[in-house]
Image: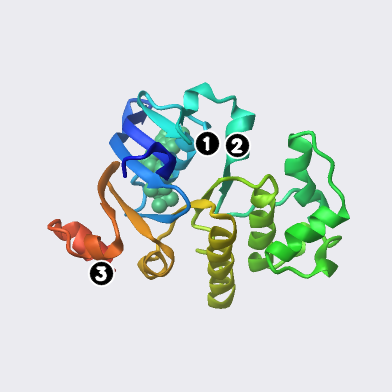
Amino acid sequence: MSKIEQVAIRFEHVNYSIDGKNILHDITGDVPTGKITTIVGPSGTGKSTLFRLINGLISPNSGKIFVLGKNTEEYDPVSLRKIVALAPQSAPMMDGTVFSNLRLPFELHGKTFDETEANRLLQLVNLDKSLLFHDANRLSGGERQKVSIARTLANRPQILLLDEITSSLDPVSQQEIEQLILSVNKTYKTTILWITHQMDQAIRVGDFTWMMMDGKLAESGKISELQMSDNIRIQQFVKGESK
Ligand SMILES: Nc1ncnc2c1ncn2[C@@H]1O[C@H](COP(=O)(O)OP(=O)(O)OP(=O)(O)O)[C@@H](O)[C@H]1O
């Protein structure tokens, strides 16, 4: 990958530590534009920390991260988060209706929001219009996750960070969310970075995969390439033999 426009996110020798504990070690790698890259690896290996670095919630101790060719340190946080949206596992909802939850990102960016826009977002995530004035905290897990995704799509981000968004869902909702994300990727050419604990999901949805181990980017490439890795731990992880 040589052309800069083909790279949505670039990590250059990124190190991150907190309270004297090294969390990420010398991460160097490119996330290609318009593709789905999954991030897999054992628990506590720094996957969510990567996301917090990308959207500027924390800064690297050394090294650089570029989003659309510009160093994250040079963005103001609001513009960065307009380009990069994060959907967390818990799909947190504010007290209030689905409508007021969907309005949040518009308020944040000083934009007007009406029912037409709200319905556009609901349609995008295959939720029925009748839910618009329901209490957001009374929705099912799958519905809440769809509202959360709709909210992240409100500002038409170029990059979507998904942190284990289906791990607490039943298989049907999980499949619906996967289809939804694949369709967002296809329709809007959104670059997607997707942390998942499920190897089968990474195989289904990912164009590329980053394998994180012990705070390092142990390997990256197509799943088929990872399956051929010389590293026995990576092989075992890809085959689902270790967690
Ligand atoms: N603010 C913090 N203070 C102290 N330690 C932290 C902090 N944030 C993360 N860590 C530690 O950094 C390591 C990596 O955490 P991170 O959440 O990025 O891992 P992960 O790969 O996303 O884990 P999981 O798959 O369990 O969600 C963990 O050991 C965690 O305890």
Q: Does ligand 1 reach within 8 Å of label 3's beta carbon?
A: no
Residue for badge 1 = 55
Q: Image quarter for residue 77?
A: top right
Residue 236: percent from left, percent from top: 21, 65
Residue for badge 3 = 239
Residue at the (64%, 65%) spot, across then down? 141
Please name the amino acid that badge 2 sits on: Arg
Residue 239: percent from left, percent from top: 25, 69
Q: Is residue 70 left or right of residue 87?
A: left
- Disc nearest the viewer among 3 and 1: 1
Q: Secondary structure at mark 1?
A: loop
Please name the amino acid that badge 3 sits on: Lys
**Lower position in the chain sequence, tag 1 or tag 2:** 1
Q: Residues within 10 Å of mark 1 (few under 14, many from 20)?
A: many
Q: Is residue 65 left or right of residue 156?
A: left
Pointer 1 with pointer 2, Cβ within 8 A: yes
Residue 85: percent from left, percent from top: 58, 44
Q: Nearer the viewer, residue 169 or 210?
A: 210
Figure check: 197 above or below 210: below
Q: From this viewpoint, is residue 125 visible?
A: yes
Query: Gap between marks 1 and 2, in whole Å?
Result: 6 Å
Residue furthest to the bottom in view is 172
Residue at the (63%, 54%) spot, across then down? 91
Q: Does ligand 1 reach within 8 Å of label 2's beta carbon?
A: no
Q: Image quarter for residue 208?
A: bottom left
- Disc nearest the viewer among 3 and 2: 2
Figure check: 241 above or below 105: below
Q: Secondary structure at mark 2?
A: helix
Q: Is residue 141 left or right of residue 23?
A: right
Please name the amino acid that badge 1 sits on: Asn
Residue for badge 2 = 81
